[in-house]
Amino acid sequence: MVRFKNRYVLCEVVAEEPRGRHCIEDRAVATAVRDAIARAYGDYGLACCSMSFTVKYLNAYTGTVLLRCRKDFHRLLCSALPLVRQLESRGLRCPCFLSTLHVGGTIRSCQKFLIQHNRRQLLTLLQNCTNEEERQRIRQSVLSCSLTEGQSQSGDEEEEDDTETD
Amino acid sequence: LLILRYISNEFLTGFCLALFPLVYWTKQSYDVFGFFFLVGYSAVALNHVVDFKEKKQEIAKPVSPSELFPSLPIVQGTSKQLKVLTRLTLVVSDPSHCNLLRSTSSNIRLYDIIAVFPKTEKLFHIACTTLDVDLVCINVTEKLPFYFRRPPVNMAIDRGIYFELLYTPAIKDSTMRRYTISNAISLMQICKGKNIVLSSAAERPLELRGPYDVANLGLLFGLSESEAKAAVSTNCRATILHGETRKSACGVVYTVKKLRKVEEEETLPACKKAKTQA
C-alpha cells in the first residue's frame, strides 16, 4: 500500500517568564525549528525535514506544540529539537526550550497521551491549590477529561492558565 | 575560592538525571530546581568542582541538601520526592593531586559520587585503572590533547567507571558543538557506546533539556538509540550505586566449596574392607 507515513512529535514550550507565552505562534515555532535543523544538519537536513513539516496544533496557554514530519527523517528532527533556544515573533524574542513529550504515528495517539499528561499536571496543580473554588474547578476538569468529549481541551486550558499565574 | 556546583540528576524509567552547575548558590538556583522537576527528572546531585591548579584548597564538607531545600518537590507521575545527592569533581592536571583520593580521613568520604577530570593522558590512564572514582569527565570545550587508547578504556569499563559527556556547550555555541561532537565520536569509537553518561552543565534554567531530548542528543554524539536512552537512565543509576558501594563496602567475604574428595576416600576403604571381610 502506498501511503506517506508521518511522525507527530508532541513538545512543550518551557519558558522562564510567563509573558513569553504571547510569542508562541505557529510561524514562530516553525522558523525556530527550521533554524535549529539548519544549524545542526545544514542544507541537507533542512531539505529532508521540510518535506512534510508543519505545526499541526498549538496551544499558547499550556505551551503544547504538535509537529509533523516524514517518518524517515524524524530522527533528524528529534535530535535537532534540543538546539532551539528562542522563539521570535513580531519583534518579540522569548528565550525558551522545547521539551519532547511524545512521538507518535497518528494525531490520535498524541492526543491520548496529551490528555493523560494534562490530567497528571492538573493533579500536581491540585496539590498546590490554596483556594477552595479553584480546587473544585480542577476536580471537575480532571473528571471531565476524556477522548470522546470535545470540551475537554478547553477545560484544561483554563485551569492551567489560572493556577500558573500565582 | 571559586566553587562551582554542578547538580546532576538521575534518569530511571521515566525519571531523569542531569548535571547542573551553580555559581554561588543564588536565588536563581531554586528556579532551576523547579525546572528540573517540571521537565521530569527524579534525582539531582549537587556538585562541587575543585580545581587543583589554583592555590591549595581544602575540600569542604558537602552541604546537606536539607539545608538548601526545606521542601523538595515531588517527581511527576509518582509520589516520591526529588532525590538530592552530593557530588565532587576534581580537576587534576598533576599526579600529585590524586593523593587526596587515597587518603581515608578527608571529607571525600561524605560525597555520594566522585568524579575526576583528567587533563593529560597519563592521568586519564591512572584514573581509569587505579583511582577510586565513579565518573571520568571528558573535556568537550576544547580539542582533546590526547587520543583515547583501548586498554585503559576497557579497564575502566570492567571496573564499572562511567565516562561523562556534557551537552550544554553543544546547545550554546557552534564551535563548542564541533568539539563536543568530535570528542564524543572519538570516545565512541573506542568504547563502542558503553558506559556513557550524558549530563548538562547548565548555568541557567533555559539551558536545561528534558530526558527524552538528551537521549536524542546522544544520537548526534554517535550513540545508538538504546545506548542513548541508557546513557540518560540506567547508566546514571549505576553510577549512583557504584558510589554507594564505594562508600559502604569495607571488605569482601567469599566462600569456597568444601572438596568432596575426602568423602570418596573414606568410602573406598570401607568397600574394600567389606569385600575382604565377606
Image: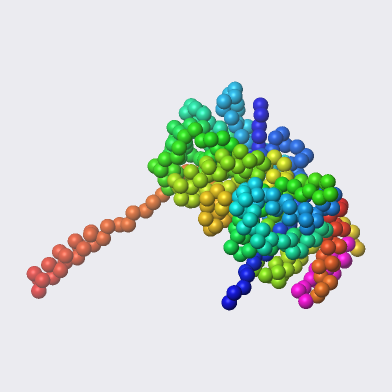
On screen, residue B182 above or below A114? above
Q: Quadrant of residue B180?
A: top right
Residue at position x 75%, y 44% from top?
B30
Q: Is residue B155 visible?
A: no
Q: Quadrant of residue B264?
A: bottom left
Residue at position x 65%, y 47% from top?
A39
Residue nearest the viewer, comparing A43 with A75 = A43
Picture coordinates of residue B201 (x, y %)?
64, 41
Q: Is residue B59 visible?
A: yes
On screen, residue B55 above or below B105? above
Q: Which stretch is magenta?
A: A134-148
Q: Is residue A61 left or right of residue B35?
A: right
On screen, residue B117 above or below A98? above
Q: Is residue A103 left or right of residue B222?
A: right
**Which image quarter is the N terminus of chain A in?**
bottom right
Q: Is residue B85 left or right of residue A137?
A: left
On screen, residue A122 above or below B22? below
Magenta highlight on residue A143: yes
Picture coordinates of residue A17 (x, y %)?
82, 47
Question: Number of callouts in the render?
Answer: 0
Residue at position x 51%, y 46% from top?
B185
Magenta highlight on residue B148: no
Picture coordinates of residue A120 (x, y %)?
74, 63
In the rendered image, the residue lying farthest to the top is: B55
Chief SS of the magenta region: helix
Residue nearest the viewer, comparing A27 with B46 = A27
Residue at position x 52%, y 29% from top?
B93
Residue nearest the viewer, comparing B270 with B15 = B15
